[in-house]
Amino acid sequence: MTGCLGRIVRAYRTLDRVAECCIQQDSNFTRFVEVGRVVLLKAGPYNGKIAVITEVIDHNRAIVDGPTTGVPRHAFPYRHLTLTPLKVTKLPRAVRTGVLKKYLEKEGTVAKWENSTWAKKREAVEKRRKINDFQRFNVMLLKKTRRDTVRKQVAKAGKA
């Protein structure tokens, strides 16, 4: 009986050490699939637009809605969306489009997204992708003149 009791005590001590180890470690993840999380859609007709998760359906899909960005309320798979660091705080579950629009306007979420580096970089890439051959040629000439001007200024500063 003592041997059995000793094994049980050792098992509890081991569990306590494991629990302490798990409690002390912080998670590396900061973006979670949760109600109110702003997401960037990566596929379909709404590619490149942002929406908000209003309800989690299961481990594969969520209901997203983007009343200010033109995304209707519909189910969307996680594999075709990217979680952003933005979140609408205190958003109730399964909120309708009108209430969600009020929350978004109150917190200025769309403006925060448009001012983010991520959105600006996406806009620049899209702009660059849409220019034609002549516009690319003009950009090349402007870069050459800028490079030449900088080279001359550096040479002048080196002599002085």
Image: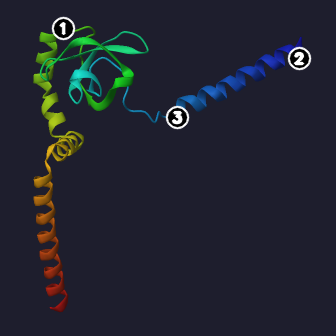
The answer, for residue 75, to whether it is visible in the render is yes
- Where, by quadrant of the figure, is residue 91 drawn? top left
The answer to whether marks 3 and 1 mark residues whose Cβ atoms lie closer than 8 Å is no
**Which residue is tagged 2?**
3
Mark 3 and mark 1: Cα distance apart in space? 37 Å
* Nearer the observer, 96 or 131: 131
Say whether disc 3 or disc 2 marks the residue closer to the N-terminus.
2
- Where disc 1 sits, the SS reads loop
Q: Residue at x 15, y 76 (%)?
A: 148
Which is nearer the eye, 6 or 49? 49
Kindly identify the residue that appears in the image at 14 percent across and 81 percent down.
152
Alpha carbons under labels 3 and 2: distance apart: 34 Å
Amino acid carrying label 2: it is Gly
Q: Residues within 10 Å of mark 2 (few under 14, many from 20)?
A: few
First-in-chain label (3 vs 1): 3
Looking at the image, which is closer to me, 136 or 32? 136
Q: Quadrant of the N terminus?
A: top right
Q: Which is closer to the viewer, label 2 or label 1?
A: 1
Q: Percent position (x, y) of residue 74?
A: 25, 11
The amino acid pointed to by label 1 is: Arg
Asked which secondary structure carries label 2, the reply is: helix
Which residue is the site of mark 3? 25
Q: CA distance from mark 2 to mark 1?
A: 61 Å
Circle 3 SS class: loop
Q: Is residue 89 visible?
A: no
Badge 1: how crowded within 10 Å, few (<14), some, or many (20+)? Answer: few
State the mark number for residue 96: 1
